[in-house]
Image (cartoon, rainbow, N blue to C red):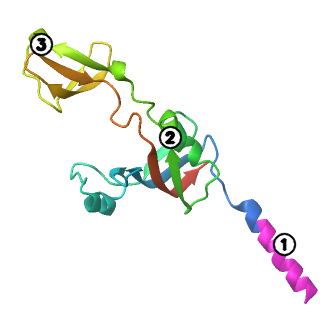
Amino acid sequence: MFSFVLLIFMVEDMTKDTIKRIENGDTISVNYIGRLEDGTVFDTSIKEAAIEAGIYNQMRDYKPLTFTVGAGQMIKGFDEGVVGMQIGEEKTLTIPPEEAYGEYREELARKVPVDAVDFTPEVGMRLGTDNGLIGTITEVGESSFVVNFNHALAGKTLVFLVSTVSVEE
């Protein structure tokens, strides 16, 4: 009886030691649902979740997201949040603005005179600058309009439900 119990503990210890945990440098695939703190879904890799949230895009290929951990391909909080996870594990990552898209910066919302451009500005229109910045027109008045160069998720805490699908070392 004693040897049987000892054998079970040995097998449990061996199993614990052989379970692969995600680390920097691993290429992994994850499914995710990204929400704002109020529960609004802003992005997902899961088609059913996109449909349910009303953000489904038929032009998008809903599949697990693949990236190399620690390579700077993801926002910092997401990258660091998956370290230590195992295949099949599900985890909620709450990511503050400073580990996501940064704080909202008022100086990145610029007022532009309407007569300085050769088009009719409309709210929601996206504009690019010569130095690569992309902004969205957020207000239009008679004589001016506002172009906001902040990321749409700047200043927001993001909550991701992440499930690991696969890992390559």
Q: Amino acid at mark 2?
A: Pro
Residue for point 35% across, 18% down? 107
Give the farthest residue toward the top: 116
Front of the two marks 1 and 3: 3
Residue for point 47% across, 36% down? 97
Total numbered labels:
3
For the question of whether residue 61 can be seen, the reply is yes
> Where is 156 relative to 6, above or below?
above
Q: CA–CA distance between discs 2 and 3?
A: 37 Å
> Where is 3 relative to 147, above or below?
below
> Where is 71 relative to 31, above or below?
above
Q: Amino acid at mark 1?
A: Met
Q: Nearer the viewer, residue 151 or 142?
A: 142
Q: CA–CA distance between discs 1 and 2?
A: 41 Å
Query: Which residue matches tag 3?
Result: 117
**Which segment is the magenta one?**
1-14
Residue for point 32% across, 35% down? 152
Q: Secondary structure at mark 3?
A: loop
Front of the two marks 1 and 2: 2
Horizontally, residue 156 falls left or right of residue 42, namely right
Q: Is residue 107 magenta?
A: no
Query: Which residue matches tag 1?
Result: 10
